[in-house]
Image (cartoon, rainbow, N blue to C red):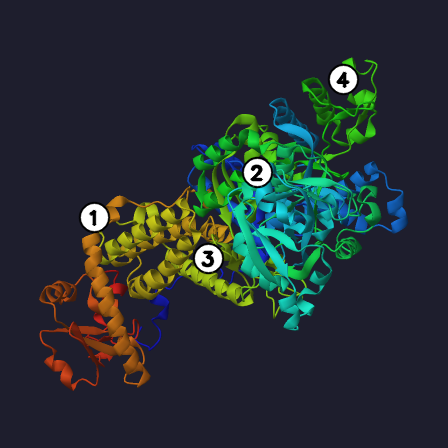
Amino acid sequence: MTESGSYKDTVNLPKTNFDMRANAIKREPEIQKFWEENKIYDRLSKENPGELFILHDGPPYANGSLHSGHALGQILKDIVNRYQLLQGRKIRYVPGWDCHGLPIELKVLQNMKPAERQNLTPLQLRQKAKAFALEAVEDQSKTCKRFGMWGDFEHPYLTLQPEYEAAQIGVLGQMFLKGYIYRGLKPVHWSPSSKTALAEAELEYPEGHTSRSIYAAFPITGLAEGIKPLLGEYLSELGVAIWTTTPWTIPGNLAVAVNADLNYAVVEVSRQDAETQGNLSAFAPLREINFKYLIVAADLVESLSSTLGVELTVKTIFKGKDLEHTTYRHPLFDRESPIVIGGDYITTESGTGLVHTAPGHGQEDYIVGQRYGLPILAPVDDNGNFTQEAGEFAGLNVLGDGNQAVIDALTAAGCLLKEEPYQHKYPYDWRTKKPTIFRATEQWFASVEGFREEALKAIASVKWIPAQGENRITPMVAERSDWCISRQRSWGVPIPVFYDEETGEPLLNAETIAHVQAIIAEKGSDAWWELSVEKLLPESYRHNGRSYRKGMDTMDVWFDSGSSWAAVTKQRPELHYPADMYLEGSDQHRGWFQSSLLTSVAVNDCAPYKTVLTHGFVLDEQGRKMSKSEGNVVDPNTIIEGGKNQKQEPPYGADVLRLWVSSVDYSADVRIGKNIIKQLNDVRGKIRNTARFLLGSLHDFNPETDSVPFEELPELDRYMLHRITEVFQEVTEAFDSFQFFRFFQTVQNFCVVDLSNFYLDVAKDRLYISAPNTFRRRSCQTVLKIALENLARAIAPVLCHTAEDIWQYFPYKTPYKSVFESGWVQIDQKWLNPELAEFWQQVRQIRTEVNKVLEQARIEKLIGSSLEAKALLYIADEQLRSSVKTLNTAIGNGINELRYLFLTSQVELLDSPDKLRDVKYNLQTDTWGIGVVNADGEKCDRCWNYSTHVGESAEHPLICERCVAALAGEF
């Protein structure tokens, strides 16, 4: 064996069939099939020894395909669940879908010809809507499974299932019997474009809405007793000034409200001065007004003077409470109304300090109206048009011509002070993207007031992640008005109420609820439309001499999904209530988290969840909101399967998407895009390559016979076990605290810095050069096995396919078929050794500095490989120098020596830095001096180290003393 290059077959190079490329598009479905055929999830979820952990799925809406925001939420859930499984807990994950409601109804109607729509019965519409929803569920379910999600996808919960609808009717029934559900004529958010009442969660507030705001004055007709002496002289020409952003509500005006504690003033309106200044246009309407004097808030006199373009002179000042029971005449209708005391909502921040009050068109107006016994007037129909009650305005649309007509009428009556555009937040229907109005209609409400304190206590008992979630939902519930739960649509669960034909009185009690609930449990909610009133009524009401009609309102879809705790976690025997966790986007503080909380507290006096985790929204790479019109939508399916042009949009597979989810700080808004995904693909590649090296290096290792006991391991290996302990403790803490980005950073750092750039770099010589069965090699393999198994387990919640792929290529037998059966990372506290670690941290620091000098020598061609070098090292600190000396003994153990750590052929430790003066390649600081010179001796043909002993063996003249010993099985 003396021929040059003939020793390569004696080197133990890594051997594995584990592919460097993920080939995810082919491999991931194979792995998913393996899980399914071996029932891995099924068995672990039931047979794990630990407690049951229930993450209850918030129902995504069965409308269209899943987008990046869904991918973030769904994958987060799966990461949590898989970690719990690896920790030995039983998990049962039941995916769910929200299937009722207006968006589906609108989609169905959009897909039909106008003539078809005309003849559509509610039942036909419901059947079409159901088919549409089930199709979307099928599509989304497929996507979830392709994400790698585990759960009971064969038996999901759907809000259209009869057993779900029946449980929901049960929740409504219990709330009604406790006195929390009532019917009332109250102003609600009404969408003329959808023709239904809306809940707060169904509104959005787009930027840039401009309203036509007006300042107007109403003539005072009578003064309250207490204020007569003060204001009597102004009465004949006195008006009360108001400001509103909704002129169309003026026909509904029944009062003007003041703040009892504010100061108000009578001001004289002086036109002459302004006119002589030639500033006519700013206050043109004021030339035709009927008022010499106005009542306004004292603090606003100056700003109103400039807004209206006139001089206002204060005549007298008094408190708001003194105005109570003063009367004024409506400028457009023949009626007299009172000035009343409002609340804190009346401020001097804008307007006039007096608030036009229409109890049929506003929440505060309604509350004040109730206090003063005012009627609820809302002369507007379902389409947003004025009714006959609005007199001359009847038939006009309040958001269009109606607004203009009211302004014109006020001008003609001499009551308009000014009109100006006003930009502010205004509620729009989140589905049609059109403005809504406040309008009093007969609706069913849940009285939040009845259980608000209990709801706030329940919020405080829950763990919120991130903690600010509690600060978001608390004020929402604290300030929430009663919840309007009825909708004027066909596609939903009916409110099971009957009305007396003669009196209009609603019939709803324990008996009628139980009867309808039983019918719906058997036949589904279509029964409400299919069956006659007779069949839907209990026996005792069928022949009692009265006739009834059934109500046609359906329940708010937030009531649907908010009942899922009753229909799913409480009803399914394999689950439990309250659930351990709810996890959704932060918009659900006003949606599902809140509707679930309110129904659960109302019925059972406790929150339906113990922990709530929320994530932010997904934006594009520039931090912009994604929209089809911008063309910046990132489709998760394209990331997984690739796009039309696979060069531009390559298929990355689900694991890269999952890795992205773990890499972002989900507590804020997160970004996604081509460059981000490409970087994450590189990270997955790095993890795969690290695992591939570990797998290859263990090809001849049998853990049962070849492992080296911890006590016998050399220092470097024990230091590495210390690092492994630190790293995987950190990873465990990251998962325990749901800070997945910490897992991502820690694992990436471990693979690149601790393994690839340090331990594995150093280990190659031991693994390749030594005889297969030597201590030097087996001790290293002992550590590699621990690193490999724990790396596979630690990445399994996130990179579930990659982890399983690695596990399937283990070169030795393991008792576990799947990585998920093997449990969580296994580390031994005795491996922790901070003192040893402190010393080795310093050695690694020196190694980094040596590498810098070697790199310089390589760039300038003194050396090719670092093995062609000899390192000269001076350490200023005496204690460290003597410690390092122990690593550099003439006869070392072939492991902890500096030459192996630095990957040089020799290292010379210097007692003073003087020798470095003449060395061209050096680096000197106060701490150390490093020099690089050519290695002594000849290059070994087998290990490529330089040695002065090459040629000493007659049998192997081309190799060094180490390789001669290795071939003899001794090194």
Crowdedness near tag 2: few (<14), some (14–19) or many (≥20) residues, C-alpha within 10 Å: few
**First along the sequence among labels 3 and 1:** 3
Secondary structure type for disc 4:
loop
What residue sits 35% from the left and 53% below the top? Answer: 787
Out of 90 and 482, give the one closest to the viewer: 482
Residue 590: % across, % down: 57, 44
**CA–CA distance between discs 2 and 1?**
97 Å
Secondary structure type for disc 3:
helix
Crowdedness near tag 3: few (<14), some (14–19) or many (≥20) residues, C-alpha within 10 Å: some
**CA–CA distance between discs 4 and 1?**
80 Å
Out of 130 and 864, give the one closest to the viewer: 130
Residue underneath mark 1: 711
In the rendered view, does 414 fall on the left or right side of 67? right
Question: Which amino acid type is marked by label 3?
Answer: Ser
**First along the sequence among labels 4 and 1:** 4
What residue sits 84% from the left and 42% below the top? Answer: 388
**First along the sequence among labels 4 and 2:** 2
